[in-house]
Image (tube, rainbow, N blue to C red):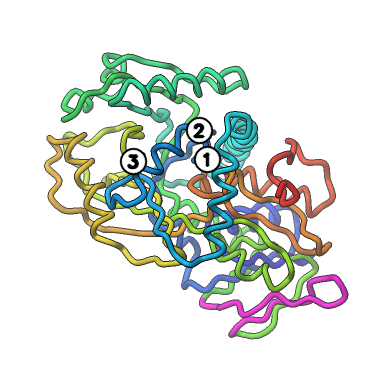
């Protein structure tokens, strides 16, 4: 079968690898000059298979009200005359109940653990290297209330087969000795031994090369999509600035831009861009070895070879990708607060990207009302984490096979 994938980030490239390795003729279109140049380029570097609590949960709403107009807040909504943002926001609020949070957590965890399994298989076969570290991820907390909440979530997930260790301050320092020099109190932590870290951009690049070399996938870069064309209830082609592309099946993996191309087809999917920021520093003697998540500031730290990637914050401001100094500054302050001995004055690089976020948390994977059009998009902050599992699922769906895990809570019809 000839399959055209729209988008060459980590989600599109992972699907290209799985489909081409199963013998399909795969082509990929992307407007950038190479794979992984947008949201996948400089993310936080975490493979958070165990992370299953969505942004939409009961504890977020009271905090969001306080954060709304603070430039240094972890989550910022910038009010605007944007009907899509308003609709998304209303759905987000509806998903902040305990019952919906639990249901969405189950869906996220199911996909996360499946993705770990599929990444293990991919890594075993390909030998792909990407500054991978497999010591787990340590979530640290400075406020007892946040620590207690995280402990409740960890105990809930453990019942579903996801091990987590609730640890005291001393154990946090034992796991990551550099925390002994932390410039703020640490009341405890949640250690997730299943989790990993690495460079998502290198991973995406290497997987694209592998797909092309070993499985003959073809990547069309510097190619801008104008429209997805349909006739007689089926997708007939994709029109671009480099010509018209035809295939037997089409997959939309365009991240935050997916709704823009789907809307003319009468497909309305509640995906909205959540802007995230990252900065990268050189490592030194006081750089942590283990990947960390700061529960107070919602900021993650990942050592990538000789670099430390620090990423976080969530800003809803449409499709604006500008790097705003007032959003970078609190990340730098958080680094200096947690790691004062690192003496970081200025980052090597700064980055902003648009994470394609659904209001309930899980991505959208599977069929649309057109029999040859599929979606694999809306992964929010967990795109790399969920990429391998999502690719395996969409491959089974296209081939008409039963999926290895349930698609409940992951398909478009949940809206």
Is the N terminus in the top left, top right, bottom left or bottom right quadrant?
Answer: bottom right
Q: Residues within 10 Å of mark 3 (few under 14, many from 20)?
A: many
Q: Identify whether 94 is placed above or below 1.
A: above
Residue 228 belongs to magenta span = yes
Specify start and end residues of the magenta stretch as a single range. Answer: 222-241
Q: Position of residue 184 (x, y in %)?
A: 19, 28
Q: Which residue is mark 1?
A: 56
Residue 95, image quadrant: top right
Q: Main secondary structure of the magenta part?
A: strand
- What residue is at 60 percent from the left and 77 percent from the top? 225
Q: Which residue is mark 3?
A: 299
Q: Position of residue 63 (x, y in %)?
A: 39, 38
**Along the polypeptide, which appears first: circle 3 or circle 2?**
2
Q: Nearer the viewer, mark 2 or mark 1?
A: 2
Task: Point out the tag, 3 or 1, that comes first from the N-terminus.
Answer: 1
Front residue of 323/120: it is 323
Select label 3 or label 2 by which is in front. 2
- Quick check: 77 above or below 402? below
Q: Secondary structure at mark 1?
A: loop
Q: Residues within 10 Å of mark 1 (few under 14, many from 20)?
A: many
Residue at 32 percent across and 52 percent down: it is 69
SS type, badge 2 = loop
Answer whether residue 236 is magenta in the image. yes
User: What whole-number distance in Å separates the C-alpha atoms at marks 3 and 2?
Assistant: 20 Å
Distance (Cα) linking label 3 and label 1:
17 Å
Say if 136 sits above or below 329 in the image.
Answer: above
Q: Quadrant of residue 342?
A: top left
Measured as percent of width and height from the top left, residue 103 is found at 65, 32
Q: Nearer the viewer, mark 3 or mark 1?
A: 1
Which residue is the site of mark 2?
58
């Amino acid at each position: 079968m000839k399959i055209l994938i729209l988008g060459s980030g980590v989600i599109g490239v992972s699907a290209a690898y799985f489909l081409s390795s199963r013998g399909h003729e795969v082509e990929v279109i992307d407007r950038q000059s190479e794979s992984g140049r947008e949201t996948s380029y400089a993310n936080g570097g975490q493979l958070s298979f165990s992370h299953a609590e969505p942004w939409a949960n009961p504890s977020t709403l009271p905090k969001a009200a306080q954060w709304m107009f603070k430039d240094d807040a972890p989550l910022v909504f910038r009010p605007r005359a944007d009907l899509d943002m308003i609709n998304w926001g209303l759905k987000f609020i509806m998903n902040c109940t305990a019952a919906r949070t639990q249901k969405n957590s189950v869906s996220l965890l199911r996909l996360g653990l499946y993705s770990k399994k599929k990444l293990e298989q991919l890594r075993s076969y390909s030998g792909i290297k990407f500054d991978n570290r497999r010591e787990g991820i340590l979530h640290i907390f400075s406020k007892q209330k946040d620590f207690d909440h995280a402990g409740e979530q960890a105990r809930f997930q453990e019942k579903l087969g996801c091990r987590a260790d609730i640890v005291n301050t001393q154990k946090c320092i034992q796991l990551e000795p550099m925390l002994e020099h932390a410039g703020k109190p640490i009341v405890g932590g949640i250690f997730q031994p299943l989790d990993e870290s690495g460079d998502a951009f290198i991973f995406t690049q290497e997987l694209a090369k592998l797909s092309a070399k070993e499985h003959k996938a073809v990547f069309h870069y510097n190619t801008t999509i104008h429209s997805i064309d349909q006739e007689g209830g089926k997708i007939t082609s994709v029109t671009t600035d480099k010509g018209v592309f035809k295939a037997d099946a089409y997959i939309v993996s365009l991240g935050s831009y997916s709704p823009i191309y789907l809307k003319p087809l009468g497909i309305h999917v509640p995906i909205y861009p959540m802007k995230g920021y990252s900065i990268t520093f050189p490592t030194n003697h006081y750089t942590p070895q283990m990947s960390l998540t700061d529960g107070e500031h919602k900021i993650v730290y990942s050592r990538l070879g000789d670099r430390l990637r620090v990423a976080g914050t969530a800003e809803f401001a449409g499709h604006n990708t500008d790097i705003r100094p007032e959003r970078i500054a609190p990340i730098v302050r958080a680094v200096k607060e947690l790691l004062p001995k690192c003496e970081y004055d200025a980052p090597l690089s700064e980055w902003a990207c648009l994470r394609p976020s659904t209001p309930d948390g899980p991505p959208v994977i599977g069929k649309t009302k057109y029999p040859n059009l599929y979606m694999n998009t809306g992964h929010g902050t967990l795109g790399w984490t969920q990429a391998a599992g999502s690719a395996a699922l969409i491959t089974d769906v296209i081939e008409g096979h039963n999926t290895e895990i349930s698609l409940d809570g992951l398909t478009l019809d949940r809206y």
